[in-house]
Image (cartoon, helix red, strand yellow):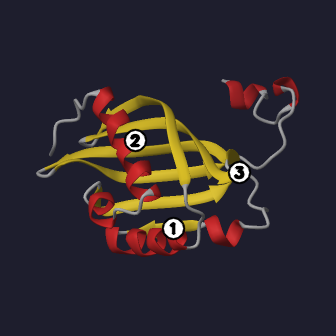
């Protein structure tokens, strides 16, 4: 079993590579960042967007993930920039390191960056013979309107504890 002591900076670099190779559609480089048994999911936080069918995925295995990503990328704008920020390690176990990060996505409209989406990415990274690779990536895009945190359902005694 790979040693779970993976450097947090290496996790951040892997996240950056994931988004860069997706945006520029470098399929061989993107595929190299996945384990064979990768689990990938994507959805909005509400599940009710007009484009839910376009973003929703719940896949297992590198071939299925790559097929979805290829179709999704081909039907998305270019240039498109996914920015993975605030990457941090959340745990270790079973030979993996888990992480969380934010995502902020832009495209160009009338010559200027235009906000597309934001969200939270959670995942797991494993050391392989070829280097670090994702064994899980879960993306949840923000679509609900912001409210005062004290009024948000996440701010309940059960959610906070």
> Residue at (81%, 26%) from the top-left corner?
149
Position of 6 with respect to 25 (left or right) is left
Dot placed on the residue nearer the N-terminal end, 3 or 2 = 2
Label annotation for residue 45: 3
Q: Marks 3 and 1: which is nearer the front?
A: 1
Residue 16 circle label? 2
Kindly check if marks 3 and 2 are in contact, taking CB atoms under 8 A apart as contact.
Answer: no
**Callout 3 secondary element:** loop
Mark 3 vs mark 2, foreground winner is 2
Q: Secondary structure at mark 2?
A: helix
Q: Exactly how many numbered labels are in the figure?
A: 3
Q: Could you give the CA–CA distance between mark 3 and mark 1, rounded to whole angstroms?
A: 21 Å
User: What is the crowding at mark 3: few (fewer than 14 residues within 10 Å), some, or many (at least 20)?
Assistant: some
Say whether disc 3 or disc 1 marks the residue closer to the N-terminus. 3
Residue contact between numbered discs 2 and 1, judged by CB atoms under 8 Å: no
Question: Which residue is pictured at 86% across the width and 27% down the height?
Answer: 148
**CA–CA distance between discs 3 and 2?**
23 Å
Image coords of residue 131 (percent x, y): 17, 46
């Amino acid at each position: 079993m790979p040693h779970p002591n993976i450097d947090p900076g290496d996790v951040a670099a892997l996240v950056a590579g994931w988004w860069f190779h997706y945006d520029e559609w470098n399929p061989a480089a993107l595929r190299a960042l996945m384990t064979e048994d990768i689990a990938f999911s994507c959805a909005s936080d509400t599940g009710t967007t007009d484009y839910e069918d376009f973003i929703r995925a719940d896949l297992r295995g590198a071939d299925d993930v790559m097929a979805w990503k290829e179709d999704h990328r081909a039907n998305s704008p270019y240039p498109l920039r996914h920015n993975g920020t605030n990457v941090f390690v959340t745990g270790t176990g079973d030979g993996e390191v888990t992480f969380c990060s934010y995502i902020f996505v832009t495209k160009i409209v009338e010559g200027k960056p235009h906000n597309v989406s934001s969200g939270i990415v959670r995942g797991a990274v494993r050391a392989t013979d070829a280097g670090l690779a994702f064994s899980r990536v879960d993306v949840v895009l923000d679509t609900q309107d912001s409210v005062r945190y004290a009024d948000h359902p996440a701010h309940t005694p059960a959610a906070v504890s």
